[in-house]
């Protein structure tokens, strides 16, 4: 595939640049009036139209006049395998009920768990496929999906099997994260160690034997899993080769970041609440701060302090947190808009956070997340736009016209 007359080819980071920190996040290299050649699903070459080789002019081409070409969004935090929506909790939020109050009333994660336990694997696969297809059509070309709505041995494995099926059915990289430590089931409400033992002694061996997960996650938060419990679960996962990616500091400064860094977590996700100790802990590590602004938007809670994190030279990623309870949307375009509007990130920073650093948070930035020769050709072409900033500026409207995955146009 040859794409010609590209107004701007976005994200020309060197292939060896796998993650962006600090000032690097403001640098979004763009080649104007460009062409791009794709071969065997990979980026073969690119350059300025004034220098396009005559040897490729005969190839079938797509004219991108007035349009930008981006690497696909890389969404490194989702929960898209679930049995049913939770709009019945929507009115409770509007009435002012807090996340904790809704959970205490039988809503929240336990609500989703009860519904998922009664759903078949085929039903979960079909509903998740519909969501994932919509996300791809909105520009997402790589995704991480968590379990965590099963909360039993059988149902957690069922969720991970669904994710495994999605990996085979869709033309994008998908990472699977084991998140049985999402909440305590009612039966273990007063027996935390009993549930942790179930995770460590029964779930982990079966999941490892079937190679169903890439990462392990824990919701480390007041009312959920303590720092000590989180440490115990992460260490157990590490014995099976599962690297940590944890929910941290969503509702309070909990010590979650520190325990994540200690366990060499790939990323700490949420960070709506931070303090100087949190920042100091992260800046002395390789852990990525993955921010989820559409969760803050939906729940009406604090937005993460992206500016302080970036100023401290910490790599920041953006992701959707798509789930039925706190973020019922998988639209990365809206996340990038919120990154600018609410997190006060510059458009270049938000785009880098949603693409290259999102890829890094899934450990796939060797092959995805930037325009470089030899990288996978997962891209999208915008509608005609006046500038890069127009994409986050025009929130609520899609600016994406064409999806390209593995060098081929994707129509769903």
Image: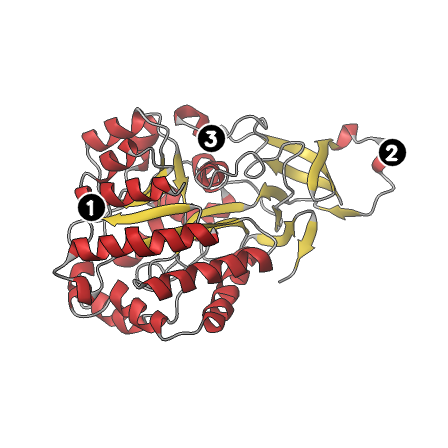
Residue 172: % across, % down: 58, 51
Report how far apart the C-alphas of labels 1 and 2 lie in the structure: 62 Å
Residue drawn at (26%, 70%), measured in percent from left and top? Answer: 89
Residue situated furthest left in the rendering: 190
User: Dot 2 surroundings within 10 Å: few (below 14), some, or many (20 or more)?
Assistant: few
Residue drawn at (52%, 39%), measured in percent from left and top? Answer: 364
Query: Which label was assigned to residue 55?
Result: 2
Q: If the image is split into quadrants, where does the N terminus sit? A: top right
Q: If the image is split into quadrants, where does the C terminus sit? A: bottom right
Look at discs 1 and 3 and give the one toward the viewer.
1
Residue 86 occupies quadrant:
bottom left
Residue 368 occupies quadrant:
top right
Front one among 81 and 332: 81
Whether residues under marks 1 and 3 lie with C-beta atoms below 8 angstroms apart, the answer is no
Left or right relative to 91: residue 335: right
Of pointers 1 and 3, the one earlier in the residue sequence: 3
Report how far apart the C-alphas of labels 2 and 3 lie in the structure: 35 Å
Q: How did the renderer colour the structure?
A: secondary structure
Residue drawn at (59%, 28%), measured in percent from left and top? Answer: 15
Secondary structure beneath label 2: helix
Residue 33: % across, % down: 69, 34
Report how far apart the C-alphas of labels 1 and 3 lie in the structure: 30 Å
Front one among 127 and 265: 265
Of pointers 1 and 2, the one earlier in the residue sequence: 2
According to the picture, the residue beneath numbered tag 3 turns out to be 19
Query: Which label was assigned to residue 229?
Result: 1
Image vertical order of residue 217 relative to residue 284, above or below? below
Front one among 7 and 268: 268
Look at discs 2 and 3 and give the one toward the viewer.
3
């Amino acid at each position: 595939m040859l794409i010609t007359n590209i107004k701007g080819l976005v994200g020309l980071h060197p292939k060896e640049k796998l993650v962006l920190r600090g000032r690097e996040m403001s640098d979004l290299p763009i080649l104007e009036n460009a062409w791009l050649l794709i071969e065997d699903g990979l980026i073969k070459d690119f350059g300025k139209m004034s220098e396009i080789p005559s040897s490729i002019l005969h190839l079938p081409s797509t004219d991108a006049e007035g349009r930008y070409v981006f690497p696909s969004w890389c969404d490194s935090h989702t929960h898209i395998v679930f049995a049913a929506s939770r709009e019945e909790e929507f009115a409770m939020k509007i009435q002012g009920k807090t996340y904790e109050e809704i959970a205490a009333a039988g809503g929240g994660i336990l609500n989703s768990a009860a519904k998922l336990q009664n759903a078949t694997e085929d039903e979960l696969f079909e509903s998740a496929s519909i969501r994932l297809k919509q996300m791809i059509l909105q520009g997402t070309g790589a995704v991480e999906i968590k379990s965590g709505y099963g909360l039993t041995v059988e149902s957690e494995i069922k969720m991970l099997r669904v994710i495994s099926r999605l990996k085979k059915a869709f033309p994008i990289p998908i990472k699977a994260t084991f998140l049985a430590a999402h909440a305590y089931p009612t039966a273990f409400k007063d027996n935390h160690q009993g549930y942790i033992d179930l995770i460590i002694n029964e779930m982990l061996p079966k999941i490892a034997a079937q190679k169903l997960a890439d990462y392990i996650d824990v919701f480390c938060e007041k009312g959920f899993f303590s720092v000590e419990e989180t440490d115990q679960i992460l260490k157990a996962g590490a014995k099976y080769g599962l690297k940590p990616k944890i929910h941290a500091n969503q509702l309070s400064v909990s010590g979650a970041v520190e325990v994540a860094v200690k366990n060499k977590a790939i990323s700490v996700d949420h960070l709506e609440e931070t303090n100087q100790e949190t920042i100091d802990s992260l800046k002395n590590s390789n852990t990525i701060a993955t921010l989820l602004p559409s969760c803050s938007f939906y729940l009406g809670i604090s937005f993460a302090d992206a500016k302080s994190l970036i100023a401290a030279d910490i790599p920041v990623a953006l992701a959707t947190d798509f789930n039925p309870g706190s973020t019922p949307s998988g639209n990365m375009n809206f996340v990038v808009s919120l990154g600018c509007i609410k997190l006060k990130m510059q458009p270049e920073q938000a785009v880098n956070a949603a693409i290259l650093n999102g890829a890094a948070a899934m450990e796939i930035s060797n092959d995805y997340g930037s325009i470089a020769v030899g990288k996978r050709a997962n891209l999208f072409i915008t509608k005609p736009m006046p500038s890069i900033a127009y994409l986050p500026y025009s929130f609520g409207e899609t600016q994406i016209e064409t999806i390209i995955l593995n060098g081929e146009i994707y129509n769903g």
